[in-house]
Image (cartoon, rainbow, N blue to C red):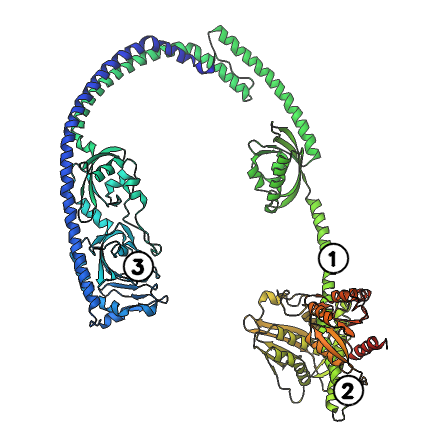
Amino acid sequence: MPSSSRFPLRQWIWRAFVQSALIPLILVESVLIAVYLLSNQAIRDTQIGHLQEAAVKDLASAALREGQIIDGRLRSIESLVQVYRDATLQALLDDRFQADELEHQRHASTDSGVFYTRSDDGRAASFYANSTPREQQDLAKVMRLSQVDPLMRSIKQANPLVAALYFNSWDSYNRIYPWFDTPAQYPHDMVIPDYNFYYLADAKHNPERKVMWTEVYLDPAGLGWMMSAIAPVYRGDFLEGVVGLDITVDQVLGEIAELNVPWQGYAMLVSHDHNIMALPAAGELDFGLRELTHYSYEEAVRREVLKPEDFNLTKREGMAPLLRAMNEGRGNVQEVLLGGRKQLVAWSEIPQTGWRLLLVVDEEQIFHETNQLAERYMQIGYLLIAGLLAFYLLFFALMWLRSRHLSNQLARPIAGIVEMAGSLGQGNYLPASPDSRIAEVSRLAEAVQQAGKQLQASELERQEAQNSLQLVLESTTESLWHINTQDLTIELSERFVRRFGLGGRHLSLSEFNQRVHPDDLERLRHLRKHFAESGDEHFDAEYRYLDAKGDYLWLLSRGKVLTRDDNGWPLRIAGTHVDITRLKQVQEELRHASLEALAASQAKSRFLSSMSHELRTPLNAIHGFAQLIEMETQDKADAGPESDYAREIVNASRHLTSLVDDILDLSSIESRRQQLQLQPIEIGGLLNGCAELVLPEVQQRQLQLQVMEPAQPPLFVQGDPRRVRQILLNLLSNAIKYNSPRGMIRMGYEVRADCVRLWVDDTGPGLSTEQQAQLFQPFQRLGRESSNIPGTGIGLVLCRELASLMEGEIGLRSEPGVGSRFWLDLPSAASPEGEASDAADEPAQPRQRLVQVLCVEDHPACMKILQASLREFAEVRGVSSCQRALAELQSSEPALVLLDIDLPDGSGLEVLDSMRADPRLREIPVMVISAVADARLFEDARARGASACLSKPVDLQEVRQVALGLLYSGY
């Protein structure tokens, strides 16, 4: 038997009683009641037909009467508009009128170019939009229109329908009463002729120049939804502007609410194109609309905003018959379905505007009395039905009790056996059996009890086997897991739940993922998705998981697919979790150690390369120009001081060259094995000497340098002169490089209790507290690594090392936005007994005949040095890039090429390769001169065909000798 035909035993007995006795009796009584109700309905329909004819006539008369009332109100508004228009035209034409001082004072201009009134003073508001430029605004017209303000105020007070009066001009000027803050409400670039309350009155829309009525629109002045009566103001044939009277939707609704609509109906106003202009609250329910009486002005209304399309009757369902009747002129009453009810709609047209006044009456209200009479008849029928129902209920109760008694004899023991079977499924293997006097039922209960005993024995055996297996698994791995992909759940072992503090063994995958480290979550999801889609049998993933103590532990999760569906999608996956945190820690320690070693090696390489290039290039200029001066002056009889000065510069440049060599010796810096020669140093000479060295660069950067006057008698500090000068020059160099444009640099000293402090001030941007904390760290340039300011970030570190070796101290005081002061404290010293100086003369090179030499060098100072050093026997032409060098070599064949390697657009070795590949240039000797003092680089240059290699700073005598050797080796 199909399962749909089964029903309980009690229901089966009850159905037998109903089918045999109750159903025939109910059928007879139902026929008698139906006859009564049908006759009552026929009487009611006859009465309603008579009342409907009378109601239609009364409703049509009411529509005509109330339409005439609305027409009269609108005519009065139009009369006021005409009066206002005439007065406005007269004010525009009155050139002799002079506004009072108050009118001038209440006008002002905004920054955006809007001319407006800033105070009320009982007068109208004024607004001249900046869409008309300030110089083109007719301010005289604004003042003449102030004489219309009393008329505007009188019209507003005389007619409660008028919400506002305004005049709008062709050049976007607006005068409106009552006053409000126009710049806060209007868009400053407002173009008034683009709005309907202006263009509807122009010659295109209103050639007769009569009063026009607008549609309902959103008022830019902030009064909400309204309609306007507007009229053009012409000066001859020129449209000066438009005057208008505003009537808000609220005011129209108030007028309509006062109309006498019979049968508790309501009136509504519709435009000639079927837009609902005013809809009372009762109509809002019928049309499913809310009349637009309010609007939130969060910003200015920048364009024309009309009522939504929902307020057009042509867009409303069920309005087509009414609209056809109004357009065709077939009577003036129509039945429509509104708000789910049948309603009668009567209309009359307002001649002045073409609008229609609609009266809407619910048919239920018209036929209320007839319906009440029919309701009484229906109540009588209902009483008859209620009596029959009471009888049948009593009869059904007696029959139900009888069927219940019979069904209990069988239903109770059978229900007990069903409960026994349910208990077996829940784990209760020894349920109590029900008591029954029926032998078959008793034997069935005994069979269920015997089955329960057998299930209990099987469950005990299964539990013992599972416990043994769990013990083995927990001894060999961290924990077990099992995923069901159909409901996206995961089942975890008890050991895992306890260790990680989870809420239970059964979790959804989203709950499980909440403990996964955020950096590993997306990767774990990707691995799961790839595993499911790829068809692999084995799953393997490593990720961090939050334990009960709040620490992340590394887990190795491995699993295997147990079952798949017909499409190969995995349904059940099982696997293990293994804690690999310690292994990951060891790997991370090894990685950090490797990175630190690599970083140390790279730092050393960067340091050596940067120092070689950044320091040798400027030293080459100093050393070279000093040698040139010395060579030019040594043969002149009257150039004694100049020769001495040049010799001192040469000595100083050699000293700096030696200093570069010291800096590049990293092992010496790290082991602090600097060899110092401590002696008294005179402060005045030291400061002035350092200032003279940096003065050219100060002037080049348009900075100012001030040096404190030396003390009398002279003050001395104890230190190595070369190292102290190096520290001060480094501080001056930083003050020059990081100063503000046209800034100031000051040098001075300060005698302290235990030392003498030498200081350098600048007016640069200053340093923050965080930057000061990082200042004396190697290679730290405070974010200027990628700037065009040269430097390596090692200067201040070297200065601190040197100061410490001379038993001194270096420090700073800085304020962001003000500048910085760096200072050097050195022990004071007594005056020395005497000073000595040595000078060495070098012979000048003999003059040679001029040969053509090409110098490829991007540093102007280095270029000049090389040109000057060879000028006695060579004419040196200079270029600053690889491209210019190749272009020059295409058109000439110099006798010698001086080649720098580090050029702006590439490596100088590319020029060397190009020359050696060209048969015409292959034999020209090339001398490489580079600031990168790298032996491997020079070996590479010689392998490519370089004739000689020199490192900066160069010795000019050596340059001259090598150049002469290359030029005249073949002669």
**Residue identified by numbered label 1:** 597
Q: Please name the amino acid that badge 2 sits on.
A: Ser
**Residue identified by numbered label 2:** 837
- Residue 658 on image: x %, y %: 77, 75
Q: Callout 1: helix, strand or loop?
A: helix
- Residue 173 on image: x %, y %: 28, 63
Disc 2 or disc 3, which is closer to the eye?
3
User: At x 17% / y 54%, what residue is drawn?
Assistant: 78
Q: Please name the amino acid that badge 1 sits on.
A: Ala
Residue at the outermost top position: 439
Q: Callout 3: helix, strand or loop?
A: helix
- Residue 839 on image: x %, y %: 79, 86
Q: Please name the amino acid that badge 3 sits on.
A: Ile
**Residue identified by numbered label 3:** 192
Q: Distance between the residues labelled 1 and 3?
A: 76 Å
Q: Distance between the residues labelled 2 and 3?
A: 92 Å
Quarter holding the C terminus is bottom right
- Residue 245 on image: x %, y %: 22, 56
> Residue 369 bears which disc, if any?
none
User: Between disc 1 and disc 3, whose residue precedes?
Assistant: 3
Q: Is residue 389 above or below residue 204?
A: above
Q: In this view, does 382 lie to the left or right of 189?
A: left
User: Between disc 2 and disc 3, whose residue precedes?
Assistant: 3
Give 82 or 967, whichever is nearer the viewer.
967
Give 497 or 872, whichever is nearer the viewer.
872
